[in-house]
Amino acid sequence: MDVVRGLLCLFSVLVSEMFMVAAFSQSMDSDFTFTLPSGRKECFFQTMKKDASLEIEYQVLDGAGLDVDFSLSSPTGHVLYSDHRKSDGVHTVETEDGDYMFCFDNSFSAVSEKIIFFELIMDNMEQEGEEPEDWKEYIHGTDMLDMKLEDIMDTINSVKARLGKSLQIQTLLKAFEARDRNIQESNYNRVNMWSMTNMLVMVLVTGVQVYLIRSLFDDKRHTRT
């Protein structure tokens, strides 16, 4: 009996390794940081499948005003979301087959470039004809085990989903930290510039005051001989 249980455990592990890729391939995410020059518009495309989910989150990390125009369009060209001069945003859409286009527009700024971070989260992106539950037909006799392979897979998928969410949150926190650091450095430079300006003005005013006071005591009368 112990041998049978051991063989069943080994078979469960092998099957789980074979089909773990299929079970884990349903959710994908990617992130990208780029520089958007002043007066420019940049567009990106993402191919999606029907009945999937696409979530886009963006942040302006650096640049005057920390704002940008954003738009998301469907494969048919219909504008799904449009943001005007925002520093960040999150949008989720249930997709259909085709290429989704999302654009960042900095044409309203004639001088300042923007550093933009965005992240894509795609769910239910399994390949056509793939059936994630097909692995069940290969498993027989697992009811003899205290924990079924299905329960193991559910637990692993739950842990994987939580780890993915944690990674997403860490990525967003890094983006927030980068933006806050850029703001602090910008404020630091402004404080130094205005401090130097005030110092120069004070020195100039002091020199003018000294000159005026000395001029009051100058004896301008001429002595005749």
Image: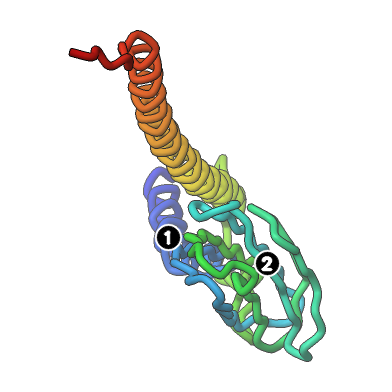
Compared across the picture, whether 40 is left or right of 187 comes to right
Q: Quadrant of residue 155?
A: top right
Give the distance between the C-alpha atoms of the residues marked 2 and 1, in whole angstroms: 54 Å
Label 2 residue SS? strand
Residue type, label 2: Asp
Compared across the picture, whether 197 is left or right of 120 comes to left
Compared across the picture, whether 179 is left or right of 217 comes to right
Query: Is residue 195 shown to the viewer in this render?
Result: yes
Q: Is residue 70 above or below residue 61?
A: below
Q: From the top left corner, tell me how far across and down residue 171 is, in percent.
A: 48, 48
Residue in front for this viewpoint, 133 or 219: 219
Q: Which residue corresponds to mark 2?
A: 69
Residue type, label 1: Phe
The residue at the far top in this view is: 217
Q: From the top left corner, tell me how far across and down residue 82 is, in percent.
A: 77, 69
The local crowd at label 1, few if under 14, some if 14 to 19, many if 20 or more residues have their Cα within 10 Å, is some
Q: Is residue 153 above or below residue 14?
A: above
Q: Quadrant of residue 122?
A: bottom right
Residue in front for this viewpoint, 208 or 161: 208
Q: Residue at x 53, y 47 (%)?
A: 172
Q: From the top left corner, tell me how far across and down residue 58 is, in percent.
A: 60, 58
Residue 11: assigned label? 1
Picture quarter with the C terminus? top left
Q: Residue at x 42, y 56 (%)?
A: 13
User: Circles 2 and 1: CB distance less than 8 Å?
Assistant: no
Residue 97: assigned label? none
Please state which of the two labelled residues, at mark 2 or mark 1, is closer to the viewer: 2
Q: In the rendered structure, which disc, 2 or 1, sits on the residue that comes first in sequence?
A: 1
